[in-house]
Amino acid sequence: MDVLIIGSGGREYSIALALTRDENVGKIYFAPGNGATDALGENVAISDYSELADFVVSKGIDLTIVGPEGPLVGGVVDVFEARGLTIFGPTAGAAQLEGSKIFMKNFLARHNVPTAKYVETDSLEVAYKFINTLDAPIVVKADGLCGGKGVIIAQSHDEAKKAAAEMLSGNAFGEAGTSIVVEEFLDGYELSVFAVCDGKDYVVLPAAQDHKKLLNNDEGPNTGGMGAYAPTPLVNDAIYAKLDKRVIKPTLKGMQEEGNPFKGVLFIGVMVVKGEPIILEYNVRFGDPECEELMPLLKSPASELFYKAATGDLKNATIEFHNKYAVGVVMASKDYPYKNSAPAEIIVDTIYHEELSQNAHIAYAGVTRGEDGKLYATGGRVLVCVGIGESIKEAQQRAYMLVGQVHFAGKHCRTDIAYQAL
Ligand code: AMP
Ligand code: GLY
């Protein structure tokens, strides 16, 4: 089958790499892709959803996979489905689980899914009143999509009130912040759990742990994610069982009952507090960089997972994962996450070490191919070095060996990815 992947990051690159290992997959297209995806398939510069659907029809593409949340919340799946095309991802209605934190929190409350105590409001008075009932730190969240920046962890009541006032006035995040969620702070450890869903049935992937802070030891500002690993030993069977019973099942059932059956990736942001999984948030797509570690662990053909989920047929799929570990280290550009950096040529040393070449690879993200045919770092998160191993330690060593082979001016990365597991 031929496949179109919508998106341009390392996540989409890693999905394509998994598809290239699958003999059922023919040609891969990317819309728009990045400077390295053109080595795995063909980049297509179309962003309008109807024009993309025309393209899919004209090329006879069998399956479209949507990577990022933007097109999902924007309704690309609705457009494709109205044309009878097979597409992996939730409709705009179902994507509200990520597109609106208020929708998500109210949904969790309606279906008794454990989440932090909260109030949703567009009134400063209501926000202040609720803030006064909480102990600091206090969490203030903009309702809409803010590219991962709409969450403030305030260290005092005053700071929380200031954040709420700035959001509600529209100064902080524009329209996306004119309604807010204020919630209690949860103190525990964070997990990323992914369920690939077909509307009714689902497959739970190995749980991952992201590293959102820029610097070692989880210090510095938040980023899109500086590295991740999977599976994490911080999840045990008891936590998986609780997630299954209290979170995934009621969510899929609730979405079905409310007329928004969920198809695609349900990304469950979990805080484990004293052994109890509490839901921080839902996203409606794979995490990035988590996807870059999960795809290489997939043993079953990737098309089996994505196509069966897209066509409501997961109950007839047996999805298997390698009994191995993956660690991914993000290499970022000079001024990430503060500002854009000047383009820098990327040079990857030839890898003679067979153990490394067979157990480590790069997932390219913020890269552009120059007219000279060379690859340049042009995005914030430039690429992810992924190591695979029989243990987390081995996978980590391989990931960092590969990091040592990659050069571009201003490159930086964390040197402690997976530390919580070691
Ligand atoms: P969100 O976009 O809702 O996932 O929030 C971004 C990050 O803020 C999360 O990954 C957590 O690290 C942190 N966070 C969000 N909500 C809470 C909370 N209630 N308690 C503690 N940390 C939180
Ligand atoms: N890695 C976290 C995210 O993709 O939102």
Image (tube, rainbow, N blue to C red):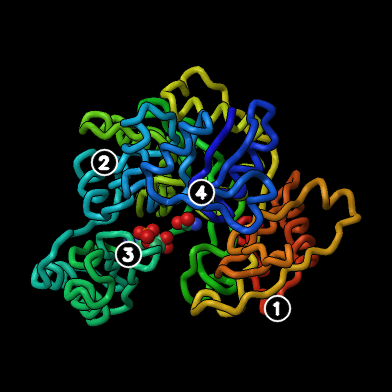
Q: Marks 4/3: CA distance? A: 39 Å
Q: Residue at x 40, y 43 (%)?
A: 51
Left or right position of 65 against 342: left
Crowding at mark 1 (Cα within 10 Å: few <14, some 14-19, many 20+): some
> In the rendered view, would you say 306 is above or below 363?
above
Q: Quadrant of the N terminus?
A: top right
Crowding at mark 2 (Cα within 10 Å: few <14, some 14-19, many 20+): some
Q: For numbered disc 3, what is the local secondary structure? A: loop
Left or right position of 331 against 119: right
Question: Contact, CB < 8 Å: mark 2 with mark 4?
Answer: no
User: What's the residue type where badge 2 is placed?
Assistant: Gly
Residue with the mark numbered 3: 185
Left or right position of 262 against 32: left
Crowding at mark 4 (Cα within 10 Å: few <14, some 14-19, many 20+): some
Q: Which mark is residue 409?
A: 1
Q: Residue at x 36, y 42 (%)?
A: 50
Q: Marks 2/4: CA distance? A: 23 Å
Q: Marks 1/2: CA distance? A: 43 Å
Q: Which mark is residue 93?
A: 2
Mark closest to the chain's N terminus, 4 or 1: 4
Mark closest to the chain's N terminus, 2 or 4: 4
Where is ligand 1, by quadrant?
bottom left
Residue with the mark numbered 4: 31
Q: Nearer the viewer, mark 3 or mark 2?
A: 2
The quadrant where residue 20 appears? top right
Pinpoint residue 316: horizontal percent, then vertical percent.
Answer: 50, 17
Label 3 near ligand 1 (CB < 8 Å): yes
Q: Nearer the viewer, mark 4 or mark 1?
A: 4
Q: Marks 1/3: CA distance? A: 39 Å
